[in-house]
Amino acid sequence: MKTEVSTSAGTHLLMGCGYTGARLARRLAARGPVLGLVRSEASAAALAAAGIPARALNLDRPGPFDPPGDLASVVYLAPPPSDGEGDPRLWRFLEALGPARPRALVYLSTTGVYGDTGGAAVDEAAPTAPGDARSRQRLQAEAQALRWCEAREARCVILRVAAIYGPHRLPLDRLRRGEPVLRAEDSGPGNRIHVDDLVAACLAALARPVAGVVNVADGCPEGMAAFTARVAALVGLPAPREVTWQEAQEALSPGLLAFLRESRRVLSPRLVRELGVTPRGPEAGIRDSLREMGLPASGG
């Protein structure tokens, strides 16, 4: 899907140009003015070398920052700090913008704000019940972004994003190490999105007169075991060994266990209907990712 983003009226500012942000910046830079903000001077130099105008802004120790005088919109992709309440990084960033009045702010949140629903489906109208500190930080940051936009009469789009995969974000290393996965009987639905479909959602959020919460997930609730086995089959590796929840306590990392404890099926009606983005399914997404990495995929 091609989404045309008007850049004639100013610069698009991206706070956070990591895995997703750098891909978004490249798409925007091909259409007009864009400025990426990153944590370090080294990261800014790397982006500049790749043709993406960038500046360093460390939100834990912010220095002076002059936003572009022709600021048109902001996409905020930076994560909150690893501890504490709320998101002081977002607060510092919005403070640094001063009196700037972009037409739109797109804030990337997480589907984790819905919490554990026992596998039940959630759409944008579902109540939020974040079960971990990170998701609570994101929910508080959403409210902060909305209040800031309301005060400036700016359009605010909250993208609640599922697990992101794509080139160099496939479980290949885990498969090569022979790490197990939680068996299907003990795990809930999976929710994910290919990075380029997330980029398309960001572009559409900038281009279309949409506001409020939009879920960003591919609508294919394939569990961890099935998705990992699909990757294995496409790259010609053995399928991962499946373990019970009890066995997983010893075999899987604490971070992965925390992720697996919550179960929900994320629906994204506004993504398709209002942003016009139809995400690719896991098979196409994995094949596209392998192709970009220069790796052959079984069966084509």
Image (cartoon, rainbow, N blue to C red):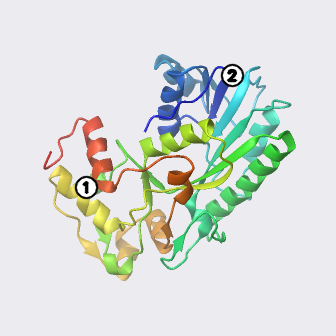
- Residue name at image x 65 percent, y 29 percent: 13
Element assignment for label 1: helix
Count neighbours of disc 2 (C-alpha within 10 A) and say few if under 14, some if 14 to 19, many if 20 or more: some
Report the front residue among 43 and 71: 71
Q: CA distance from mark 1 to mark 2?
A: 42 Å
Residue 215 image point, x, y percent = 56, 57
* Observer able to see residue 186: yes
Q: Amino acid at mark 2?
A: Gly
Residue 285 image point, x, y percent = 33, 48
**Mark seen at residue 10:** 2
Q: Which residue is mark 1?
A: 231
Residue 54 image point, x, y percent = 59, 23
Give the vertical position of 105 relative to 175 (above or below). Answer: above
Which numbered disc flags the more N-terminal residue, 1 or 2? 2
Report the front residue among 117 and 262: 117
- Residue contact at pointers 1 and 2, CB within 8 angstroms: no
